[in-house]
Image: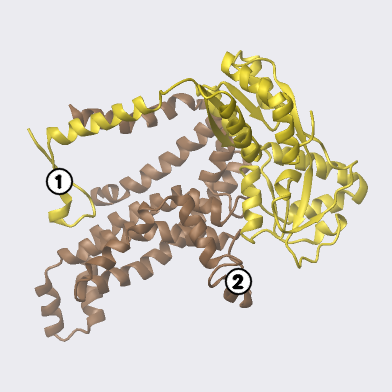
Amino acid sequence: MSYTVHIFFLPRPLGMVDVTRRVRALALLGVLAAQACSEDGPQVRVFAAASLREVVDDMAEDFEAAHPQWSVRAVYAGSQTLRLQAEAGASFDLFMSAHAEHLDRLHASGRCDPPRVMAGNRLALVVPEGSSTEDLEGLAKAERIVLGSREVPLGRYTEEFLGRAARTYGENWAHQVRDQVASRERSARLVRAKLSLGEAGAAIVYATDADGLSMRRIPIEDGLNPRANYVAASSSELGRRFLAWVEGPKGRARLAERGFLPP
Amino acid sequence: MLAGLLIVLLALPLLGLVFVARPRALGAVLFSPAFLEALGLSLGTTALSLLMVITAGTRLAWSLATSRPRPWLERLLLLPIVMPPAVLGVALLSALGTQGIVGPFLQGLGLRLPFSTTAVVLVQVVVATPFYVQAALAAFRRLDPELLLVARSLGSTPWESFRRVGLPLALPGLISGLSLAAARALGEFGATLMFAGNAAGRTQTLPLLIYEALERDVTEAASMALLLLALATLFILGPNIVRRL
């Protein structure tokens, strides 16, 4: 039995393909092989907030070097995206979120241990070199401000900051700033990408993300700058092991190296 | 058997959407200002981009169909369909962005594309054009060249022979291509997110709003998705409905 498939758009001689049994068998084999590949040795499946990418990579490397029998496979995305995936059944051993709420909810539905604060961060206001924005007050006159979306932890901390700053600079100031928002991005790293691409006239990112940018940083007073708390929760023995490493002296050192605050 | 499985694979997700969306949520969502705003923006930008696709795309397809064959050019026109949307977004930024190839020049003219509604339209044009041009090209190729020759020999100009003979005969093909292009433009997501950003009322089209809602309330997102799907179905089936009338 053979099927003739006409592939839309392809010119006739190319588009008429004979799909024989052999091809089907090969396709099936490919699927099986792909499944087999994903099952070599115990793997610590880590879900981590986008802003933790480098530091978790560092820690995973250390951890694997110390425990050659284990490997760490990390997935990075906005914490809210990862929570959504976990709720839909994606399994993880350790979840490191940039906001407590996501893990509180996962814990409440019995998907993980109680979450613990593992590190902290601050916000940073960054503008390109040559920007006319000199201080926080001048942010109201900046163009093309890029922030985190309200669903993203960074966006929530940013709203908290804007709320606090409005008490100092006035509601009108906060209103003007919100008016100038050109985009609300889906993860902390996408906000930073818009800065690196030169599209953002000003952006609020995590302090740790600002460190890697060769751009001008406008200081935010401590009283206005909310502390971002990274929380972690494990759901298996493997996850607990890796979390113990993260919270141990070696993990702490890596976090400090990358500019994260102690818990 | 295999064909049946394929149909199930294609249809099941749509069915899933129907099950997740709640009728009560559907009504609430339909009249929420955020949804209406995004819907309006989506329909408006899609209409604009289709207008550009029709005017420029028909010309392009006609000249491809009537001049010497350029198979490689026709194949290259498919690139926007197969490019990962995020890559297309970055590509657009590096061409038309603030630091792109022609971005600074455009800025000199007072045109700053990224984060603008114009950017949304441009992305839609790029992703929808291949669908329309391919269909139009096929439709023009199916025309009997003799008919056009006769028209010319009876004294019509090339433009007249196109408008009065070629266009009416190829119309069903053009409409079918247009309906695909419309559905694709309406559903555009990844490149828009990269190139146009995400700002309610300006660049947040329906797919972007759905993505945002997904992380807040899955039921709400599914209800919006269902409505988007209904619209896309209408676009896809449009030519069949028109033919029945």
Q: State the image quarter where residue A207 is shown.
A: top right
Q: Relative to the observer, which residue lies in front, B163 or A170?
A: A170
Which residue sits at x=15%, y=63%?
B142
Q: Which mark is residue A6?
A: none
- Chain identifier of the residue bearing label 1 in the image: A
Q: Which mark is residue B111?
A: 2
Task: Report the side of B26 relative to A101 (left or right).
Answer: left
Mark 1 element type: strand
Crowd band around label 2 with a 10 angstrom C-alpha radius: few (<14), some (14–19), many (20+): some
Residue positioned most to the bottom:
B155
> Can the viewer see residue B28 in this picture?
no
Q: Relative to the observer, which residue lies in front, A106 or B52?
A: A106
Chain coloured yellow in this rendering: A
Amino acid type at circle 1 is Val
Q: Which residue is mark 1?
A: A17
Mark 2 element type: loop
Which residue sits at x=72%, y=41%?
A258
